[in-house]
Image (cartoon, rainbow, N blue to C red):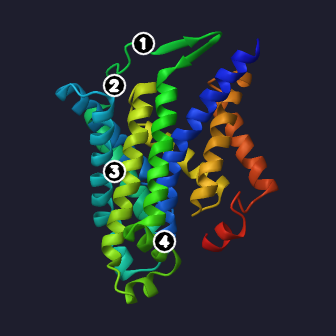
Amino acid sequence: MGPSYYIQLLIAGISNGAMYAVIAVGWALIFSILKFSNFAHGGTMVCAAYAGMFLSKALGLNLWQTLVLAALCGGLINIVVELISFHRLRRKSKNMTLFFVSSITMGMLLQNIIALKFSGTYYAYPSFFTQRFQKIGNLSFDMANLVMLGVSAAAILALIIVLKYTRLGISIRALSMDARTTSLMGVNVNRVVLATFFVAGALAGIAGVFVGIRTSLTPQIGSLYTVKGFMVCVIGGLGSMNGALFAALILGIVETACGVIMGTSLAPVGTFIFMLVFLFLRPQGLAGNFATEKA
């Protein structure tokens, strides 16, 4: 196996990592403002993935239109999740156990709604690429991986710009530090929370489209990517978006390497072993004390 083979594996791993980064950054956003892990995130992703698939087929949409509509669906679904599962808890209780139980329950509800309706049939997105695999010299590229890498990078860059240079972004960052002080400064905390949930849901919708393009859609992908998103956030340092980005890329490359070395069926085992070893050596995650304080 020549260098071209390993270059292709590296690109595939980075593309996987980019998709995990989109999921994990949305997860980290919610954790940063509410200080709990939203385990309903995977349920939002699977609902948005199915919505994007049916809309693309019914309306004959191209990839970019499908991504926009799936992101919109994901954002709206996440707003409903916040209003049903967390809004009253935020006002009435500070018990993190209740948030944890509520998020898991909502995630299971969303996934089971999809399972009741669609579990008997495997669905796939339409082919958005006239030629899925392109060859350049000795290298063969999966266009889905390259587009996924580009879209993920663009989405994360747009989020960084919003967080750094817009009024909403400043409000989100302030809320992540101190909710009470932020409200005393005249910021409508409820609106900021809803906007944050919308952004996180939109990112989950984008990730759901790419999961659907690369594999068949099943209701169980919600649980699978909930676990992977949580793994990325733990390795990166809970609440740290920078840590989540680096951890996602590392996890994507490790998972691809494990698939080659151990086979695709055993690749998750290798990924979990990597996570356990990493956390044994660095339990605070990549982000260090910052994440430890917030967790």
Q: Whole-percent x and y of residue 267?
A: 66, 30
| Amino acid type at mark 2 | Tyr
Check the picture and name the quadrant holding the C terminus: bottom right
Mark closer to the observer (3, 2): 2
| Amino acid type at mark 1 | Gln
Assess disc 2: are there few (<14), some (14-19) or many (≥20) residues with their C-alpha within 10 Å of its C-alpha. Answer: many
Relative depth, front residue between 157 and 280? 157
N-terminal of the two: label 1 or label 4?
1
Q: Distance of mark 1 from mark 4, alpha carbons?
A: 43 Å
Q: According to the image, label 2 marks what residue?
A: 125
Indicate whether 116 appears above or below 63: below
Indicate whether 156 appears above or below 32: above
N-terminal of the two: label 2 or label 4?
2
SS type, badge 2 = loop
Mark closer to the observer (2, 1): 1
N-terminal of the two: label 3 or label 2?
3
Residue 265 makes an appearance in the image: yes
SS type, badge 3 = helix
| Amino acid type at mark 4 | Arg
Q: According to the image, label 1 marks what residue?
A: 131
> Which mark identifies residue 109?
3
Q: Distance of mark 2 from mark 4, alpha carbons?
A: 36 Å
Q: Distance of mark 2 from mark 1, alpha carbons?
A: 15 Å
Q: Whole-percent x and y of residue 252?
A: 62, 37
Residue extending furthest toward the bottom? 184
Indicate whether 55 appears above or below 137: below
Relative depth, front residue between 209 and 157? 157
Q: According to the image, label 4 marks what residue?
A: 173
Relative placement, left or right, of 35 versus 103 is right
